[in-house]
Amino acid sequence: MSTDTATADTHTEHDPHATNTGISNNKLAMWLFLGTECLLFGGLISTYLLYKTRGNGKTLPTDIFDIPFTSVSSFVLLMSSLTMVLALSSLQRGDVERSRGWLLTTAMLGSVFIGGQVYEFTSFYREGIGYTTNPASSAFFTLTGFHGIHVSLGILMLMSLVVASVQGRLKPQNAETVEIIGLYWHFVDIVWIFIFTVIYLIPAE
Amino acid sequence: MATSEEPLALESGQADIAERPLGVMTRPQGGNGWRDWLSSVDHKKIGIMYGIAAMFFFVVGGIEALLLRTQLAFPEQGFLSPQLYNELFTMHGVTMVFLFIMPLAAAFANYLIPLQIGARDVAFPRLNALSFWTWVSGAIFLNSSWLVGGGGADCGWFCYSPNSGITFSPTHGVDFYAIGLLIAGIASLVSAVNLIVTVLNMRAPGMSLFRMPVLTWMLLVTQFLLAFALPVITVALFLLIFDRVFDSQFFDPEAGADPLLWQHLFWIFGHPEVYIIILPSFGIISEIIPTFSRKPIFGYSFMVFSGIAIGFMGWGVWAHHMFVSGIGPISVLAFSLSTMFIAVPTGVKVLNWLATMWGGKLRFTAPMLFAVGTVAMFTIGGLSGVTHSLAPADTQQTDTYYIVAHFHYVIFGGGVLGLMGGAYFWWPKVFGYMLNETRGKIHFWMMLVGFNLTFGPMHVLGLQGMSRRIDTYSEGFGFDFWNLVATLGSYVIAISVAYFFYNTVVSRKEAVDLPPPGPDPWDARSLEWMLPSPTPEHNFDVIPTIESQDEWWHRKYGYDEDHNVIRIATIEEVAQKGDAVGVHLPSPSFWPLVLAVGMPLIGYGIIFNLWLCVLGGLLTGGAIFAWVLEPVDDPDAGHGHDGDHSDHSDDDDDGDAVAVGADDSAGGA
């Protein structure tokens, strides 16, 4: 396996200089993908904004938001962006061990956020807001659920990096891979800032 | 490491390949057996497969159309039941849009973009294979609803709610529609990202953006539209499937949901979709018309910028599909105006094509006939489109056959005719033999006449008040005659398509006795014509350095002191030989196919039994990990890095699949 990785390494080293834009193919593709994701979340956020007051006579998600709790889990998610940057920076400086630690921390912080979301969904369900209760609840669970799935996939990618790092296959010359997954991770965080502001902080009239 | 004594990297590594990602499958090594098509990551093979599959679904959608027209040939026929009629027109629309014309455009994009920008392949060859196989699995999934879903979707191709809900559409047809289009959407999204990166990053030295052929430009705009339009319909389809399977409340008016949500989401995707369909055809005829007018394209930068303008403005006109849905006078006014405005860049294009032909030495070959036919028919469709921007008139025309006439003039007249022209134009480049010209011209005239017979009368029927999607009509409404004409016309189209297939087969047999077409049978202008026909597996022996627009033309022709065009080199002198050795190409892979097979299993699982989802998820997830662990380039395949380029002294290529820095040795004059 080591020779394979070496081959791949020379390519990642080589590509950025060969492209017309100076940005490697992989990174450009990730930027484009994130651009398309903006429209995905744009559609979901618009749907929620359209439906947030349509309760069909039942409880609305906005009636029972626990802002302090969600603020804490939002803060945890934001901090995971910081640790992601630290992971990349350590790897770029050649400190593989430390970068592994920061990657693991990032994944852990992401998991805490997901745990918070599971708790929130459960408590909503106990208070009588299920997925099928009303248009507002369907839109709320779909939007935050899509975001949760994105975070979970990010955690999966981070853990794959950690495993690769343990196996000794994540070397400083692979820093761009970490950077690209970092782009995804930061994007998911930024989307959450939007969701938190638009959905939780702006009160329904 | 294999040595470069072997002719090409792909065929050189047959030795012991120990690479078994996850210990499952041996790395395929390339060749021409059926396994090599299944595992191919070659953009040309993938393009050909896209083309063949698209033509197959053209036949499927065409048969559906013939059944519809047969039902409508005479008043009060009972040939099709109303329910079956609903399913057929829905599946006809979905098939033609998503399974025929988009993939046929993808065939051209895959095959031609790398050739026109001077690249060895696309940026992500395996993702390219994934796009194709995912699209195939989505297409098969969608059509499998005829067999296992209790019939096709019956909600019309835009599937308005609440018609798409369980109440009004109790079979699984709409489930198959939603999940099938989601899978096909993943394919198009991956392909869009891949091709955008290819165009932005992998151009040959000197190939600046404004030296790219207009076709590549229009395909680039198309990919941007796809990349940003598909996520919106993805949202809509997810909401629809959640409503139907998980009982969410997005489209249930009784629970206070808004049916207009679907219409907005659908048409925010749906109107850019119209340009996704038409722009590749615009690009194709922008290559054909200059070639057969022996003139450069008139106003290249106007062509490019009007294409970009269409790309932007296409986002601001969606609600003209919704003038009668009660969106309010301000919205109607705004979208009326934007709809009128978007006619301007399209008009610029039509004028530029005419100006390109003006004063040119015209040769009316089969591709040129199709190109000119496209301009004429698209202009008719465009003009009837402008009549829709007048909201009062549109209110009268909505859901009548006038609309059906309009969009078939745009999509068939503007889209399909152009793509057929492209098929005739690039056929020798792809398959190494020419399609017979006489039969090509007969095909064109049959198709043009059949097309106008079918869709021309629909203008009249629509203005007479015949509503769209009605499974029959009564005698005495005055609909009889033109419906019969339209039905006869549709059979003429069917015969012309059959004749096209006949032409491809017979021309291939006849080509054995004819001289080969050579690299450049049409005396054309862009880079792909400097390569032998059919294109060699490695594309360019040496990546050319680009010095001007229409690079290939300028390698053949120069100017004398009186500024007359003179020939400065023969094709043989400046064309590449296709005999490079030791060119390193991306290695084939089975994982895209495996990943694509997993997705419809998830789809069946959502509809029938969630355990199937587990199976599909394992297949998909496993394939992703195997894919990541599989190196992009097989380390055992021949590598240019070994430095033994043996007998090709000019080949300065560093042997990389993404090599764009190689010297040019084939520059003419």
Image (cartoon, helix red, strand yellow):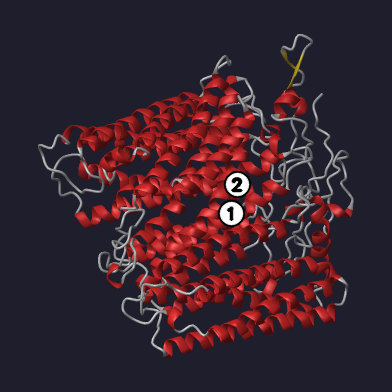
In the picture, measured across the screen, residue B2 lies left or right of residue A187, that is: right
Residue type at mark 1 is Ser
In the picture, measured across the screen, residue B148 lies left or right of residue B379, that is: left
- The crowding category of the residue bearing disc 1, from other C-alpha atoms within 10 Å (few below 14, some 14 to 19, many at least 20), is many
- Residue visible at 80% across and 61% down in the picture: A12
Q: Position of residue B592 (x, y in %)?
A: 60, 63
Residue B473's image quarter? top left
Task: Assign a secondary structure to mark 2.
Answer: helix
Q: Position of residue B323 (x, y in %)?
A: 33, 47
In the picture, measured across the screen, residue B67 lies left or right of residue B597, that is: left
The disc at residue B21 is: none
* Residue linked to disc 2: B110
Q: Position of residue B81 (x, y in %)?
A: 19, 54
- Between residue A196 and residue A116, name the one nearer to us: A196
Residue at the far left: name it: B476
Residue at the far front: name it: A205
- The crowding category of the residue bearing disc 2, from other C-alpha atoms within 10 Å (few below 14, some 14 to 19, many at least 20), is many
- Residue visible at 28% across and 61% down in the picture: B163
- Asked if the residue at tag 1 contacts the one at tag 2, i.e. Cβ–Cβ closer than 8 Å, the answer is yes
